[in-house]
Image: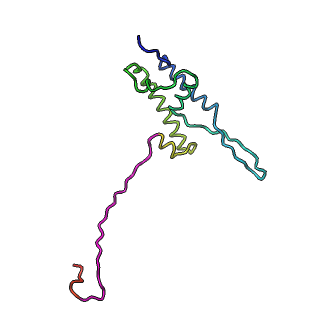
Amino acid sequence: MGKHKYIETPEKMWELFIEYVQHEKDNPMYKTEYVGKDGEMVRTALETPITFEGFECYVADKEIISDLGDYTSNKDGRYEQYATIITRIQKNCFVHNFKGASVKLFDANLIAKKLGLIAKSENTNTEVIKILNIDPLDDSSDNSTT
């Protein structure tokens, strides 16, 4: 008999992910600012990035399972049926965060690092510089540059 699966089906995993996304929308983070001459406090709701790690925390908080590692790694070939839904969840996280960074809803540098999108460039310019030591007052033929 196989080990009990805490998330019984891929469909149940998708339902939990949708719940997580809704939970994040219903529980935003807030930015507090003091505006105007009287310093009136204004709280602005902020949308937060959707992440696979956040989803893992959500299912852990619901006491369903504390780690989705077996599902994502398909431990012992027992989670093959979850591969498509896990890919779908990961792509949803990617697209949500990429779009959020694109419209400056989220910090672009932070999201780019998280998504592995940091462009790495290496400058390997090498130039040979020939230094001439010419004495303008020397009329000898040794001073020629040919």
Q: Residue furthest right?
A: 38
Position of 128 compared to 23: left or right?
left
SS assignment for the magenta stretch, majority: loop
- Point out residue 77 in the picture as x, y percentages from the top left corner: 37, 20
Q: Residue at x 55, y 37 (%)?
A: 49
Residue ranking furthest to the top: 1
Q: How many marks?
A: 0
Image quarter where the N terminus lies is: top left
Identify the residue shown where x is 22% and y is 88%.
140
Percent position of residue 53, x then y:
51, 32
Q: Position of residue 123 (x, y in %)?
A: 37, 56
State how the image is colored: rainbow
Question: Does the segment drawn in magenta span residue 80?
Answer: no
Task: Give the image location of residue 16, x and y in percent.
Answer: 54, 23
Q: Which residue corresponds to the image point at 47% horizontal and 25% vertical from the top-left?
A: 68
Screen quadrant of the C terminus: bottom left
Residue at the image point whose x is 49% and y is 16% from the top? 8
Q: Is 99 displayed left or right of 121 in the figure? A: right
In the picture, measured across the screen, residue 20 lies left or right of residue 145, that is right
Query: What span is in magenta?
Result: 115-139
Q: For this rendering, which residue is in front, 1 or 10? A: 1
**Residue 134 sits inside the magenta stretch:** yes
